[in-house]
Amino acid sequence: MHRQIAILLLAVVMTLPASAARRRSAAPVVSDALSIVFVDGGTDGSFTAAGGEAWLDVKDVARTVVSRQRGTHVQRRIGIRVVRTSGAATGTATVTAHLDSSDGRTSMRLDGKPLTEAAMIVDPHAAIGSVVFHILEIEVSDAVAPGPIAAAITWEVTAQ
Amino acid sequence: MKNAIAVCFIVAVFAVASTASAATSSGTLTVTGTVESSISLTVESAGGTTSGTGTAAATSDLGNISKYGSAPTGFTLARGASNWTLSSTVGVQVDKANLTSTDYTLTAQLGSAPASGITWKLNGSTLSDSAATTLTSTGTYGSTGSYSWDIVVADSAAAAAIDNAINFTATSN
């Protein structure tokens, strides 16, 4: 008897995926994939976004006379919108960011926190579908030689 | 048998958890720009009732001045036979950023022609509104250079405002 029950349970478990597959094939396909949309938070036209890629050109960076602090500081507002492929604006996601690459000529802070190669939580509960703006600060030391600067920041969203 | 059932349920629970695993996605923000060399000049101090120190546009108010009156704040007054001199100092600081230059040249020039009978001097050199006067050609970045500032008033000068501006220019060497 016990053996029969065990066999029956195993059979039920083994048929679960098949049943689910049948349900999936019968129901409309609703993708739950997430993606990041970058939103320009400034007005200087130096921001370009396409899909999950964005480019911010801070152009010429020079220390101004009004700043008595050492180094040159550039600040930009970057908007992040987490969207579902399905278009559903429900739920929340965790947004993290890390420095993917850098020429070492700048240091960056995101919402006041140093940006490093280790992922940091930018927003633990970002509402999916809503734009949340973040402040990116770029600091150039006075000792850095003039010339181009480049860095890439990878943002990752995880559904909760 | 109980063990077998338990295993089955664990497998089922993990299967569900796996199906509901978090969806993730990533995006990349590329940041570019160009660092430019720069220097900045600030007026750190000056005689008179001064405002705007620490910026590039300071104002010094001497109030009403006269040969036999009191010296304005921060000035001394020396009376001569046919003129009198108000003396003070002006502190100017030049900072550099992203620049390999080791020193700078500082010049000064009056913003407008001085009133008749009024002579403006910095570091002992008479200033004019037509040409810049070199105060130093080996200025040190990051430290305040102090320059003597004299306003010489002839006794024959009319009683009137002596307003003027001293324009400083720093050039990296």
Image (cartoon, coloured by chain):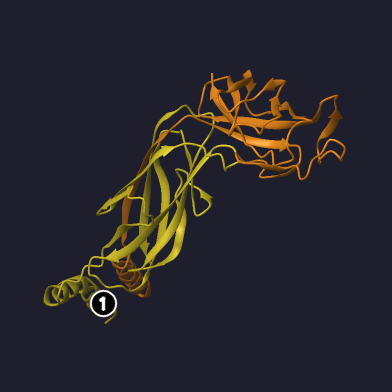
| Residue plotted at (45% across, 63% down) | A124
Q: Is residue A89 left or right of residue B144?
A: left
The quarter of the picture where residue A68 lies is: top right
Q: Is residue B82 above or below residue B62?
A: above
Q: Is residue B126 above or below residue B48?
A: above
Check the picture and name the quadrant holding the N terminus of chain B.
bottom left
The chain displayed orange equals B
What colour do you see for chain A?
yellow
Asked which secondary structure carries label 1, the reply is helix
Check the picture and name the quadrant holding the C terminus of chain B.
top right
Q: Is residue A121 left or right of residue A38?
A: right
Circle 1 packing at 10 Å, graded few (<14), some (14-19), many (20+), is some
What amino acid is labelled 1 in the image?
Leu
Q: Is residue B112 left or right of residue B32?
A: right
The quarter of the picture where residue A24 lies is: bottom left
Residue furthest left as drawn: A26
**Could you tell me residue A79's position as x and y percent?**
38, 59
**Could you tell me residue A47's position as x and y percent?**
32, 49
**In terms of depth relative to the viewer, which is nearer, B77 or B105?**
B77
* Count of numbered marks: 1
Q: Which residue is mark 1?
A: A9
